[in-house]
Image (tube, rainbow, N blue to C red):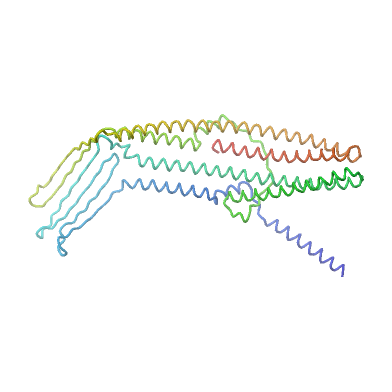
Amino acid sequence: MFILNRLFFITLCCGFFVSSLHAQETLEVYSLEDCHRFAVQYSPALARQRLTYSNLVEAVEVVKAIYDPSLQISQAWQDEDDPQRTTAVLRQQLPADLDVALTARREVLDNEDYTSYALSLSKTLLGGGTFLEAKLPLERAWIEKAKQANILSLEQRQLRLGVTNDFYAVVRNQLTLHLRELQVERSKKNLEHAMIKEDPLDIATAKLQIPENELAVISSKRQIANSRLFLTERVGLPVAEPLNVNTQLVFEIRPFNMEQDLASALENHEEILNARMDVELNHMEAKVARTRRYPEVRAALSMEENDAPASSDSNMRAEIVLELPWLDRSDRAEARRRENDLKQSELTLYSVKQRVEQQIKSIAVQVVEAERSVVLSAERLLVLEQQFTLYQDRWDNGEIGILEFVRSQNDLENARVQLVTKQTEYLELRAEYDFKIGK
């Protein structure tokens, strides 16, 4: 009976082990590029920016509709059975404040049909009505759309940077957990060796190391869970199913040319492009405001053809209207305000360029420092490995106590954790540098 129970237990354990392996094989593991792709597809923040950009695209179409022709048809009756007049008016607004209206009218008088046609043109000659002024609403809509496209690009790059940092946080915590688990195993072996030597001080010291290392393992597991949740939430996937990412660290030192990258960023960075467009728009606004300071002079021309009796065959009329607002304070104040806006946008452009240049130079120094830190940490790890080998031989031979051996062991294991931290920090700084230069 005991043998049967034992076989049943072994069979159950084997089945559980096989099913666990199968579950691990079917659990999909995602790379950094996979996470970037998910973020572009599912991120709510990026989706909101896309909707904002779509609205500005539609705003351009709304402004373009100003120049759409309009047709109005009306019919009037003197009484219910006798339609008297039918009128059709086609209006078209053209750039440079040129308005065109074509009117066709059909009248019934004494059972006779009469038709008339009229064409009218009007144009502001002074005090506005320039081609730039008419074009300004459309230019404003185009610039706002282009600025939003740059904001969308910046948001997408910012999202990519955030995903990269979250991904490397998962990798760093996972590799740290592995090293902490090895520390627990080593501390248990140290306790076994200390018990063999029967030294009370060594036994007590070894026992203290086990709970400390186990607490470090618990902390690492908590950090892994949190970092996976942050990554899943950032890419826009349900946090109830955190992403299982590939924690194999692929590390390489990538060279860069800061001067070349800086020149490219000062020309193509989204914030600088938007600041330039603000200057361009404010320049147009100021130019239009200057033209409105003058008295308004408007010319109108109308021509009418009419076959009704007691009217001439054609009638042409021209008029010029001069409008001189009293004191004209509002237009002059508006012109000064637009000039101030232009100067302010130029100062903003200068400040943005200064900030982008400062950030790039600052992060470049940090990248160089991080690169050197990785090299020095790797060299220090090699020395500590050699030192630990010497201490282990002396510990095995009983030449030193466990305190010195544990101290050298902890130094080695902490150096391994530090190297992983330095490598991931370098990769994060390198990603931030790429973001700052506009990649």
Q: Residue furthest left?
A: 310
The residue closer to the viewer here, 256 or 279, is 279
Q: Is residue 377 left or right of residue 10?
A: left
Q: Is residue 32 left or right of residue 298?
A: right
The residue closer to the viewer here, 204 or 320, is 204
Q: Residue furthest top?
A: 259
**For the image shown, how many numbered marks are present on the structure?**
0
Q: Relative to 265, does residue 247 appear above or below in the rendering?
A: below
Residue 116 place in picture, x, y as percent: 15, 51
**Residue at position x 61%, y 44% from top?**
164
Q: Residue furthest bottom?
A: 1
Which corner quadrant holds the N terminus? bottom right
Residue 132 place in picture, x, y as percent: 33, 36
**Residue at position x 92%, y 45% from top?**
198
Residue 173 place in picture, x, y as percent: 69, 46
The quarter of the picture where residue 138 lies is top left
The quarter of the picture where residue 131 lies is top left
**Residue at position x 52%, y 43% from top?**
155
The residue closer to the viewer here, 58 or 29, is 58
Residue 367 place in picture, x, y as percent: 63, 34
The residue closer to the viewer here, 61 or 202, is 202
The quarter of the picture where residue 399 lies is top right
Which corner quadrant holds the C terminus? top right
